[in-house]
Amino acid sequence: MPTPAWLILLYTLPASKAAARLSLWRQLKRLGAVSLKTSAYIMPQRPEHEESLQWLAQQIREHGGEASLLRSAEVDTISPHDVIDLFQAARSEDYLEILTAANALEATGRRKTTAASSDLAIEAGRLKKRFAGVRKIDFFDCPKASEVKEVLAGLLPVEKPPKQGFPANIAAYQGRLWQTRPKPELDRVASAWLIKRFIDPTATFVFSPERNAFQNAVTYDMLHADFGHEGDDCTFETLVRRFSVNAPGLDEAAQIVHAADLEDAKFARTEGLGLLAVLRGWATQELADNGILQRGFDLMDGLLSHLKSR
């Protein structure tokens, strides 16, 4: 393997910026960066990594800190092999968490009746999606990946939830309270936009992971939701189908949301990845959940206008 070149982010943040520090740590972890020492993170030198780290450096400065992004063919205090070992150790830890959860889920599946298979299949799907996310930041092909892949491939041979839910009576869903999980990402934001624009114009939205947190709320895109993933469909597609929503460009919008949310290669659409990145960026700015929705509505309005105009 050729010796990689490196990107090294050096930074300081004021002691009072604890929330910014935590947000930065989460973003670096999501990118796959590893810590060389306190306030120094390293990644393989690639254009997409450089762009991401430059963006983080800008965020650090906006929070009153200092940041420098270095490009180096080597790190004086540690060998290239040892740097790669840091990445392998981090990814091994990620894979071990997935493997532990997968083994526990498989054991649960052996004890459950078929009536519970739908919930187990959903959890299995989430683990597989999580595995796909770790693979994207597994820059040096950690050996642990093959073991996890094998376990996930044979996980829970249960029936999928039925693809077709009952058609919904739109008249029964007017002026309703709609509940989903906090920190909405693309499927939840797009679904809320669809609800507001095409299903329930006077809808209000609340956020909690607990299904019974709000009395009489219509739940979507959460565990045991009234409207959620059904078969191969994301929540946005479920809402379109069950409410028979039809508008120019909406089928393409559904494909874009599906591709970004499920990452199952069913649709060759990449536009949603940009939308998802923007939404995640707003979340790191500590916007309220309803604030993310409102901005996300503008994104979806623009997307649909673009799709209709082509």
Image: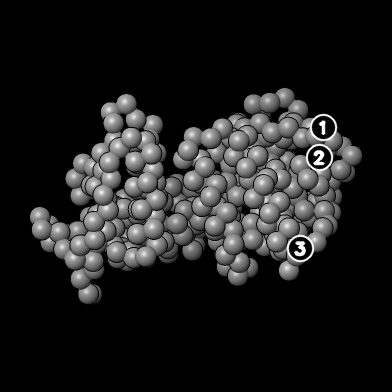
* Residue 148 in the figure: left or right of residue 182: left
Query: Is residue 224 at all visible to an observer of this figure?
Result: no
The numbered mark at residue 18 is none
The numbered mark at residue 200 is 2
Going by the numbered disc 2, the residue's amino acid type is: Asp
Going by the numbered disc 1, the residue's amino acid type is: Gly
Q: Mark 1 = which residue?
A: 175
Q: In the picture, residue 202 is in which quadrant?
A: top right
Label 3, label 1: how many angstroms apart (C-alpha)?
28 Å
Q: Nearer the viewer, residue 112 or 213?
A: 213
Label 2, label 1: how many angstroms apart (C-alpha)?
6 Å
Q: Mark 3 = which residue?
A: 308
**x 64%, y 26%: residue:** 213
- Is disc 2 placed on a helix, strand or loop? loop
Label 2, label 3: how many angstroms apart (C-alpha)?
22 Å
Q: In the picture, residue 222 is in which quadrant?
A: top right
Q: Nearer the viewer, residue 105 or 84?
A: 84
- Is disc 3 placed on a helix, strand or loop? helix
Q: Earlier in the sequence, mark 2 or mark 1?
A: 1
**x 25%, y 39%: residue:** 12
Which corner quadrant holds the C terminus? bottom right
Closer to the eye: label 3 or 1: 3
* Percent x, y of residue 160: 65, 57
Residue neighbourhood size for the residue with mark 3, other residues' Cα within 10 Å, grouped as few (<14), some (14–19), many (≥20): few
Residue neighbourhood size for the residue with mark 1, other residues' Cα within 10 Å, grouped as few (<14), some (14–19), many (≥20): few
Q: Nearer the viewer, residue 18 or 227?
A: 18
Q: Earlier in the sequence, mark 2 or mark 3?
A: 2
Q: Are marks 2 and 1 in contact (CB under 8 Å)?
A: yes
Which corner quadrant holds the N terminus? bottom left
